[in-house]
Image (cartoon, rainbow, N blue to C red):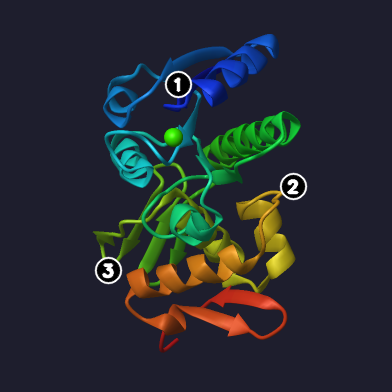
Amino acid sequence: MRILLVEDDAHVAEPLKAGLERHGHDVEHVTTGAEALLAGKADLVLLDLGLPDLDGLEVCRRLREFSDVPIIVLTARSEEIDRVIGLQGGADDYVVKPYGFRELLARIEAVTRRASRQRRDAEEEPPADRGKLVVDRRTRRALLDGVALELTRREFDLLAFLAEDGGALRTREEIMDRVWDENWFGSTRTLDVHVGSLRAKLGDPSWIETVRGVGFRLVEPGS
Ligand code: CA
């Protein structure tokens, strides 16, 4: 796999690059946000948040404008996690420093496995039509009244999963398993953060019904 490592701290970057290369990955290492945005195509991005030029989240957001490459954020700031995984960032996952190399490898594997599963799902699935809302995994677009919603990768995946199967009730466990993955190390609070941001973007909170203690269901308002 070709990995873009964005990390300004040589004490962190050098052993990490060496370790990843030992595991057969091809690593391009850059030290600034500007270089990250100009780097070649990668299969995965490891992104430090504390960069000398641009805020790491800004880098993440800009990468998302032209790519849906999986991004794992490396952060020393655990209080930043909601921002990272949630609203602005569009990162797929995060690892809090100091982290173990094995943990990082497990995250890399999980994120790439999920990305390939999503590609496979997308090829097979016709768009889900929930009245005013149409979710198409093949184009990764969700249209509300014919207008494309601006969703982060994870918001899209969550919406697509809820829209499948006639808007069936999905338990929190099913959602964490399908939209995040079976090895998710973080809390399921991240699910509530994403449901909140999706409701806001759908413009009507009643699109996503909470079934207390169980999970969520997509319902067209007024239907
Ligand atoms: Ca740094």
Q: Quadrant of ligand 1?
A: top left
Residue at left offset 47%, top offset 45%: 91
Image coords of residue 14 (percent x, y): 55, 16
Which residue is nearer to you in this view: 60 or 130?
60
Would residue 40 appear left or right of 160 to someone viewing this image? left
- Front label number (3 vs 1): 1
Task: Please rate how many residues cluster around mark 1, counting C-alpha atoms within 10 Å: few if below 14, some from 14 to 19, many from 20.
Answer: some
- Front label number (3 vs 2): 2
Residue at left offset 45%, top offset 28%: 7
| Residue behind mark 2 | 183
Kindly check if marks 2 and 1 are in contact, taking CB atoms under 8 A apart as contact.
no
Image coords of residue 202 (percent x, y): 36, 72
Q: Secondary structure at mark 3?
A: loop
| Residue behind mark 3 | 145
Q: Is residue 137 above or below residue 105?
A: below
Residue at left offset 47%, top offset 26%: 9
Q: Secondary structure at mark 1?
A: loop
| Residue behind mark 1 | 42
Q: Secondary structure at mark 2?
A: loop
Dot 2 amino acid type: Asn
Q: Is residue 50 above or below residue 223?
A: above
User: For residue 206, which quarter of the picture?
Assistant: bottom left
Kindly check if marks 3 and 2 are in contact, taking CB atoms under 8 A apart as contact.
no
The reply to whether the residue tagged 3 has its Cβ within 8 angstroms of ligand 1 is no
Disc nearer the start of the sequence (3/1): 1
Which residue is nearer to you in this view: 205 or 82?
82
Which residue is nearer to you in this view: 188 or 74?
74
